[in-house]
Amino acid sequence: MIARRDVLGGALALALPVPALGAALPVPPSGRLGFDVWRGSRQLGTHDLVFHPSADGLVVDVSVDIAFRIGPITLYHYTHHAHERWAGGDVVEISTQTNDNGTRYRIEGHRDSRGLVIEPGGQPAYVAPADALPATHWNHRELDGPWINTQNGELLRPHVTPAGMCMVETAASKPLRVRRYALSGPVQLNLWYDEAQAWAGLSFIKGGAEVRYARRG
């Protein structure tokens, strides 16, 4: 039997806009973030996030599809799907599936009395540090603590250096003013956040070429 309060809670979630449910989180007003992924002058794929209101907070679905092709031949193909559930500003559940050019990964995570328990596929489970967040980048709070690698569940502690304001180009070739953070150590990349603290893109070097995320919209 469905309790009356559950029905009311679900109705309230549907009635509220996404930003109201994620007021403490940098949720875009449209409920979506999308990026085109480039390596030099070649587009490799897309990275999309969809934010859904829920009765107790927020659900975030992430989908990545990247391929490197020469003519009709695909030399490398990567897909990644992540599902996060947030309540009260905390991650309470995460599940991911990754296919890295034929090598498959899967992780599960849930919050209990001990904290956020991460279960990497085939590896021992562990309780993540209280300030650890999934490395899905949309929440700038991830810069303040350890990262949970959403592909294999590894706990990472990147060194984060604020690198000031700069201009980047969106997918529509428009300039966007962002704050850049340079990451080093176990993670080598640049992360960009706009003046509203929304994720604006990233860049890193792979195989001697720059890979860059250009935000759509």
Image (spheres, rainbow, N blue to C red):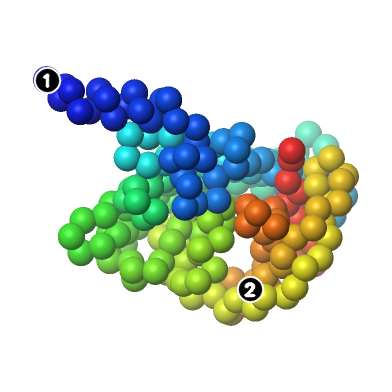
Reading the image, the residue beneath label 2 is: 183
Q: Residue furthest left?
A: 1
Q: Is residue 63 above or below residue 149?
A: above
Rendered location of residue 153, percent (x, y) = 41, 60
Name which residue lies at 26% across and 62% down.
Answer: 115
Q: Is residue 198 above or below residue 172?
A: below
Q: Amino acid at mark 2?
A: Leu
Nearest to the observer: residue 124 or residue 63: 63
Q: Nearer the viewer, mark 2 or mark 1?
A: 1
Q: Quadrant of the C terminus?
A: top right
Asked which quadrant contains residue 194, the reply is bottom right
Q: Is residue 154 visible?
A: no
SS at circle 2: strand
Q: Is residue 213 left or right of residue 150?
A: right
Rendered location of residue 87, percent (x, y) = 34, 48
Q: Amino acid at mark 1?
A: Met
Q: Is residue 88 above or below residue 206?
A: above
Earlier-in-chain disc, 2 versus 1: 1
Rendered location of residue 70, percent (x, y) = 81, 42
Nearest to the observer: residue 152 or residue 25: 25
Q: Is residue 31 left or right of residue 120?
A: right
Res 1 label: 1
For mark 1, does the 10 Å Cα neighbourhood hold few (<14), some (14 to 19), or many (20 or more) residues? few
Asked which quadrant contains residue 27, the reply is top right
Q: Quadrant of the N terminus?
A: top left
Q: Residue furthest top?
A: 1
Rendered location of residue 176, percent (x, y) = 81, 53
Q: Is residue 178 visible?
A: yes
Name which residue lies at 72% across and 67% down.
Answer: 180
SS at circle 1: loop
Name which residue lies at 47% across and 61% down.
Answer: 149
For mark 2, does the 10 Å Cα neighbourhood hold few (<14), some (14 to 19), or many (20 or more) residues? many
